[in-house]
Amino acid sequence: MSIIKLHDLYFKPFISENEIKSIVKYLANKVKRDLPKDEVPIFVGILNGCFLFAADFIREFEGNCEVSFVKLASYQGTSSTENVKELVGINEDLTGRTVIILEDIIDTGTTLQEIYNIFRNKNVKQLKVASLFFKPDVFRKELPINYIGKSIEDKFIVGYGLDYNGLGRNYSEIYQLSTPPTMKNIVLFGPPGAGKGTQATFLKDMYNLVHISTGDVFRFNIKNETELGLLAKKYMDEGDLVPDEVTINMLKAEVEKNADANGFIFDGFPRTQSQAEALDAFLADKGEQINGMVALEVPEDLLVERLLERGKTSGRTDDTDETKIRNRFNEYNTKTAILKDYFEAQNKYYGINGVGSIEEITQRIAKVFDTL
Ligand code: AMP
């Protein structure tokens, strides 16, 4: 999950699809349990916001039921307004029926008041209200809400049917209003030996970014014989990837150490799909995002040559043995190369010709960095 932009505003992930699913299920079960055995309720959804909630709720509800909708207008922009009115009414005869209102969210209670007004004269047997979300801090009415899925703070939320000026209803998760992202975060990508580390040392100064090389952090830990180093060593020596969980936690710690950074150049991370997803979620949580993946494209034969050459002076055992180098390429091709698709799907992939002089390549990358 990444941050999203709707009109002029940014939103960050707040409630996951899974959590929503379990809340909806809980509500449907609870409503069912409270009904007399053969009671056929009529669920009335309050449009537009409730359409996904209502659809999921009634599928979780076990037993016969009827479904209807009313449409009320209440929101302009991001704050609740007082003038609520009924736009599309109920056609069913509700006399003697159990009516259960399905609301996506109740905040000030103005809409809820309107609902109680509308149903007061319909001779229903009982009227109950089930709301997916509730904002207790801003609720200003003395009206019963029989079922509450989740109480939340007074934050403006979108997604799962809820909108900001018409947009955002189609997301499966709930997002909350966030400040605009301030960082420039770039993934410097490419196979082993492509020159990521070399380029990053120039680019971090040019753009005032913090360079995080996961390989360097591992090597530092190995040198200092830390617990992390001992763990990583056996994988690195073989040219295998260090397990995701270890790498992801380490990466997060490195980012946290530089909380005031203008942004990061991630070098050697992410290297797997789950690392990429973890990075997206981690940054989104801070209201930040990856601006782009800049990939150095270099033919494999040239890379092996470069790595063997580097191995003469780098002191890296994984650079001197061609079998280990080949294994690193194998890891790259089977686990890492697919990240091109991952970032391309988000329109964030920028391929760069990685063959040429160091300066030439820096210039090519800078051209892309300037646009991100
Ligand atoms: P590098 O310096 O980027 O070539 O990385 C050297 C070695 O560190 C790799 O071959 C892996 O064993 C380990 N490593 C570095 N980054 C990662 C990562 N993101 N995920 C797993 N292993 C990594």
Image: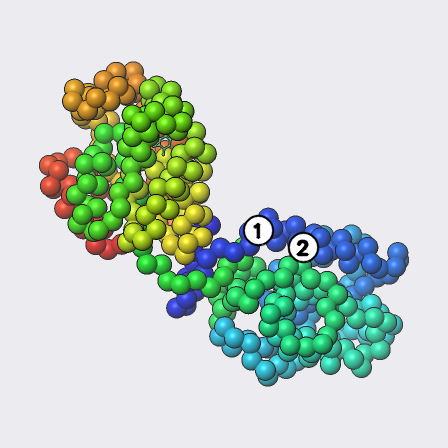
Q: Would the CB of label 2 be found within 8 Å of ligand 1?
A: no
Image coordinates of residue 199 in percent, x first then y, are: 19, 40
x 36%, y 22%: residue: 233
- Image quarter in which the C terminus is found: bottom left
On screen, 211 above or below 99? above
Quadrant of res 278: top left
- Seen from the viewer's position, the closer of residues 330 and 246 is 246
Image coordinates of residue 128 in percent, x first then y, are: 77, 68
x 26%, y 42%: residue: 211
Instruction: Check disc 2 and report the residue beneath it.
Output: 24
Which of the two discs, 2 and 1, labels the residue nearer the N terminus?
Answer: 1
Image coordinates of residue 163 in percent, x first then y, are: 52, 67
Image coordinates of residue 2 in percent, x first then y, are: 43, 52
Mark 1 lies on a secondary structure that is helix
Mark 2 lies on a secondary structure that is helix
Q: Is residue 236 left or right of residue 23?
A: left
Q: Is residue 302 left or right of residue 225?
A: left
Q: Quick check: which quadrant has ligand 1?
A: top left
Q: Is residue 72 left or right of residue 4?
A: right
On screen, 189 above or below 57? above
Q: How many marks?
A: 2
Is disc 1 surrounded by few (<14), some (14 to 19) or many (20+) residues within 10 Å? few
On screen, 106 above or below 219? below
x 72%, y 56%: residue: 27
- Whether residue 330 can be seen here: no
Q: Which mark is residue 17?
A: 1
Residue type at the position of mark 1: Glu
Label 2 and label 1: CA atoms lie apart by: 11 Å
